[in-house]
Image (cartoon, helix red, strand yellow):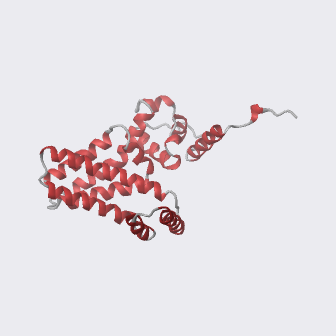
Amino acid sequence: MSVKMGCMATPAAASTTAITARAEAVAPVRSPRRTDALSRERVVAASIELLDAAGEEGLTVRALTAHLATGRGAIYHHVSGKEDLLAAATDGIISPIVGAGVTQAVGEEDPCQALRVLALGIFDAIDAHPWVGVQLSRQPQPAVFRLWGRIGALLQDLGVTGTALSDAGSALLSYVLGATTQYAAGARQAPDDAAREKYLAELAAQWAGSEANPFAHQAVSRLVEHDDREQFLAGVDIFLTGITAFK
C-alpha cells in the first residue's frame, strides 16, 4: 500500500494555517484598494485589531494589507517592519493610559493614589490585550520608557531621590509588568466565571496534594475565591509601603 506524503500537512504547517486563517478572518476578502491617504495611526490601529484577533503570529504584512485594502508599499511607508509595528501597537495601548494618568493627577496631592491608578490601568490593558504584556517584557521600547518616566516622576513626588529612585522604580515596574502578564495568562485558561472557578478549584486541589508547606496551604485556602485585580493592587500597596518607608 503506497501513501502519497506530498498532500499531508505537518503539525507545524497546520498550526500556521490556523493562525493565518484567524488573522485573515478579520480582514476583508478581495476588498477594493483604498483611495484615501493611509496614515500611520490607521496602520497601528489595524495592527492592534489583528493582534487582538490572532496574536503576534497573526500580524503579517499579508493580513495587514488585506485588512487595510492597500499594498505593501503603503505599509512600509509608515513602518520599517514587524518589530516596528509591534512596538507602535504596544505604545498605542500604553500611551493613552500614561496620558490619562497625567491628566487625572493634575492637582493630585497623593502620588501613591496616582501610582495605583496607573498600575490598574496597565492591569486592565494587559487583561484586554494579553500580547501587550509579552511585548513590554521584551527589548526596551517607547511604551516602557513612557511607563518608566511616569513612575519615576510620581516617585519623585513622593520624595524618593538618588539611587533609591532608580531601585524603587525598577522594582515597582517589574512587579507591575510581571504580575499583570501572569494574571492575564491565568485568565486565558478560563473564558467565564464557571470555567474560572473550576480551573482554580482543580489548581488548589493539586497544590494541596503536593505541598506540605503551611504557607502553601494557607494560599490554597484563598485561591478559589480571590480576585486577581484586588490581589494585584494589594501587591502594589505593599511596594508603595516599602518605598515610602525606605526613602
Residue 104 appears anywhere in the view:
no
Q: Nearer the viewer, residue 35 or 203?
A: 203
Which residue occupies 50% across, 56% down?
188
Q: Residue at point 45% right, 34% down? A: 82
Q: Is residue 175 left or right of residue 84?
A: left
Residue 89 drawn above or below residue 199: above
* Place of residue 106 in the rendered image (x, y in percent of width and height, measured from the top left): 17, 57
Residue 140 located left or right of residue 211: left
Left or right for 184, reference 98: right
For the point 77% across and 32% down, the residue is 5
* Front residue (pair 184, 225): 225
- The x and y percentages for residue 145 are 27, 41
Q: Is residue 205 above or below residue 118?
A: below
From the viewer's perspective, is residue 188 above or below residue 220? above
Where does the N terminus fall, quadrant-wise? top right
Work out whether residue 216 or residue 10 is closer to the camera in this orientation and state it.
216
Q: Is residue 49 above or below residue 216?
A: above
The x, y position of residue 196, in whole percent, is: 50, 65
At horizontal 57% and vertical 38% (from top left) the residue drawn is 32
